Image (tube, coloured by chain):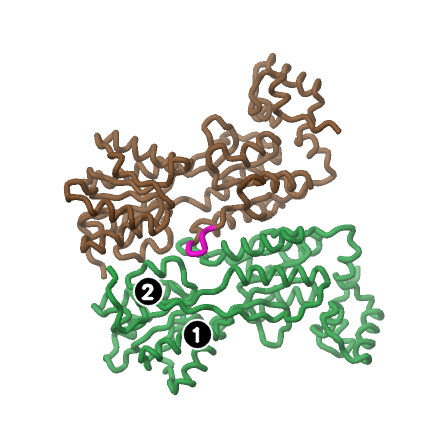
Chain colours: A green, B brown
Amino acid sequence: MRSRITLKEVSARAGVSYQTVSKLLNHQVHLSQETEERIWQAVEELGYKPNLIARSLRSRRSHLIGYSWAPTHPDQVNPILDHFLQAMVQEAENTGYHLMAFPFRPGAEWTDAYRDLIDTNRVDGFVVSSVEYNDPRILFLLEQNFPFVAFGRSNPDMDFPFVDVDGAAGMRMVVNHLVEQGHQKIAILTWPSSSRVGQNRMEGIRSAMVAANLSTPAEWIAQGDGDYQFGSQAAQSWLDRPAEKRPTAIIAFNDSMAVGAMHAIQSRGLCVGEDIAVTGFDDTPMAPYLSPSLTSVRQPTWQIGERVMSMLLSILDGTPLENTHQLVDPQLIVRDSSRRVHRQTR
Amino acid sequence: MRSRITLKEVSARAGVSYQTVSKLLNHQVHLSQETEERIWQAVEELGYKPNLIARSLRSRRSHLIGYSWAPTHPDQVNPILDHFLQAMVQEAENTGYHLMAFPFRPGAEWTDAYRDLIDTNRVDGFVVSSVEYNDPRILFLLEQNFPFVAFGRSNPDMDFPFVDVDGAAGMRMVVNHLVEQGHQKIAILTWPSSSRVGQNRMEGIRSAMVAANLSTPAEWIAQGDGDYQFGSQAAQSWLDRPAEKRPTAIIAFNDSMAVGAMHAIQSRGLCVGEDIAVTGFDDTPMAPYLSPSLTSVRQPTWQIGERVMSMLLSILDGTPLENTHQLVDPQLIVRDSSRRVHRQTR
């Protein structure tokens, strides 16, 4: 049996990108009459049957939105999962939809779960999160022309509907706050450069540093696993240096690394905030209760959940969307860990 | 149109409890021949059609398990949600089932969501959590004779399949640990007595106190909202008393209250652990990183999720169950907040 014609074959014959074909079939774009005709001709000649058409032929939709998410480490907690899920579940229910959870299994067969759910008409659309560069799920769903919305961005040239936190903006707030506190020597606890989210936040730091006429030497950028141990060890290696080669502030890309750095600083008898500032990201519930309380960046999780689901339901409904690339601003919560002089509150 | 005959009417005519009828129809019990015959006669005379039969008559099942859960406060995080969901989702997938999330809306129409999902054949069963006394969801699902498994118990006389943490056992471990550390004056930060989970844990405390020949005066039991502020204020009121009327140890029913109590103690210049011991419950991720690190009780969340789903799938499958009332033991994690003499590790 001849395997089903793909969107790639259609786009190759029409001489356009498959994103262009996808958008045309989804009524998301108007192209020149000549281009549109060429694409429709390729569709006809190859006998391409987009899932779009298959879907409209179905007697009824499943009214289910598929979602799976990366499990957290047994010793950690996902600080945004509950509110993200609740927001999506409530938004979906308004139009008679429900969220269907399936296991998160990255690897060689990652897209198989998505294919199975599509082929069995199990779901009408997907929400995708923990998006990375060249994300196989995004590539697969674009190729299948199956409705989805991502929480997060991927490669700049991959065009798909998303809602994302403006991590760069969040980090600019952090750098500007540290510069206002008089810091010039700022170190960074980040993830490997393969991290899409990490790269976005690094861009924010770099642009704010340039604007403040500051630079960050490579030796003050530590890339690691993102856990407490890594934050602690990297901070210790900076503290082992002569005083003039030590940073006076440490920006961590999550709260776990920040807490590791705080404890490393305190283990040398130094004071977090007064001697060395530390900031985190996520504003986990423990942040206000640490000693000192931790400055962190809070993501508007509920709003993101609502917007992701609302955008997907509009796509399923055929409602034209004004903006399918939505960035939302995070919020900087300043606490004692980044204050030069803080009152000892207890 | 005559409304559908209910299980209650059947049980009234047969002169047995509706739990008994429910169990018989679910093949969960063997009764005396005389009783079984009386029930079957009532079923026939009244023309009762259990959902059980309706379900088997359906062309196909939905293969969906409905679940909704209590959202956490915006400033808090649900420490077990991720692992509980992941465990259920993975266990369900093994037999071709998926988890379907729907909004949590307690109140007058709480059971309507369940009724809608049953009537529309949307789900084949439910998982119910945050179970309380006289829980309307449990009463409704028993009455409907619709398959479900609860994470948690309700009234002792309501018989339904559940998996629960043995909170009493967890609290006995806490009390025994504190007694071993030489404590005799132990105060308690708990929830209102309407809390099913709270009552179970209190039983554990009481039995361990009695075994150690100790008592807890009413003035050392504070019942409240379970948040940081309540823990802090209750601890302060104890610290305001003359030294001989102060507790030397405080058992909190969650980590948030424990942290509030720790900070209240520290604000008086006292040392948590050496002067007054504090223990929490839940073992939230912040517990090891507090100053001092917090002793807490950890629930085997993954195991509970697997067992709940596995039990429900067995019920749906018609597989006889050996034990539909499963208690799992929590684990006491001792840290510096309850050690009389603890080394200062940083």
User: Which residues make up the magenta segment?
Assistant: B72-76
Across and down, in percent, residue A3 comes to 76, 62
Please check whether the numbered discs 2 and 1 fall on a single chain: yes
Q: Residue furthest bottom?
A: A213
Asked if the stretch drawn in magenta spans residue A234, the answer is no
> Mark number for residue A307?
none
Does A269 sit above or below residue B300?
below
Which subunit holds the residue at mark 2? A
Residue denoted by label 2:
A260
Across and down, in percent, residue A305 comes to 56, 60
Does B89 sit above or below residue A147?
above
Looking at the figure, which quarter contains the N terminus of chain B? top right
Asked which secondary structure carries label 2, the reply is: helix
Q: Is residue A81 left or right of residue A47?
A: left
Residue denoted by label 1:
A171
Q: Is residue B218 left or right of residue B8?
A: left
